[in-house]
Amino acid sequence: MNLPANPTDSRIAASVDLDGRQRARRGFALLGLVWQSALIYGIGRFVYLTVQTFIAITRSGSSDPKLMAEGIGQALVPVIVWGSVGAFGLLVTVLTLAISSYRARWFFWSSVGFSVVYLLLLPMGTLLSIALIILLVAKRKEFVASRSNASGA
């Protein structure tokens, strides 16, 4: 025997579903930004290993090009590895911005910051960074609108 569905039950289910979608959107935005922070780690590791190489060369007392090439080569590995992870995070951020309706202020400003870092430091992230900047500029009013909607609620 089929009884008619209670309209309040369907509204509650719809609001729970919307909350779940909003959490998923926020999760993707956060995941993209966390993965992008790998770039900062890779650059920091590169600087540390490069300094260690120069210290080792200075202590040895000779300017052996083989030692320098080996040290710089090892220092570039974290930039490539963590930069690739960071570029993937940038792609996730671009897709989150383009596809979802998540519009938090922290998402906007951290995306702007990371896109500038990519634009300045990594050639492989330049195209994605330019795409992100274009999307952010095009959708900047949506971020302002979400702030006024949140304060009015």
Image: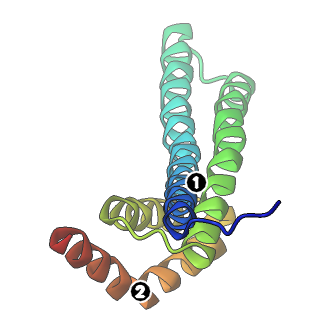
- Expressed as whole percent of the image width and height from the top left, the position of residue 16 reads 52, 55
Instruction: Please name the residue that numbered disc 2 is placed on.
Output: 137
Q: Residues within 10 Å of mark 2 (few under 14, many from 20)?
A: few
Q: Nearer the viewer, residue 24 or 55?
A: 24
- Expressed as whole percent of the image width and height from the top left, the position of residue 118 reads 53, 62
Tag 2: residue type? Val
Q: Nearer the viewer, residue 144 or 150?
A: 150
- The C terminus: image quadrant: bottom left
Q: Residues within 10 Å of mark 1 (few under 14, many from 20)?
A: some
Q: Nearer the viewer, residue 109 or 120?
A: 109
| Residue 24, numbered label | 1
Residue 66, image quadrant = top right
Residue at point 45% right, 59% down? 114
Residue 126 seen anywhere in this rendered image of the structure: no
Above or below — where is 15 with respect to 148? above
Residue at point 16% right, 74% down? 152
Tag 1: residue type? Ala
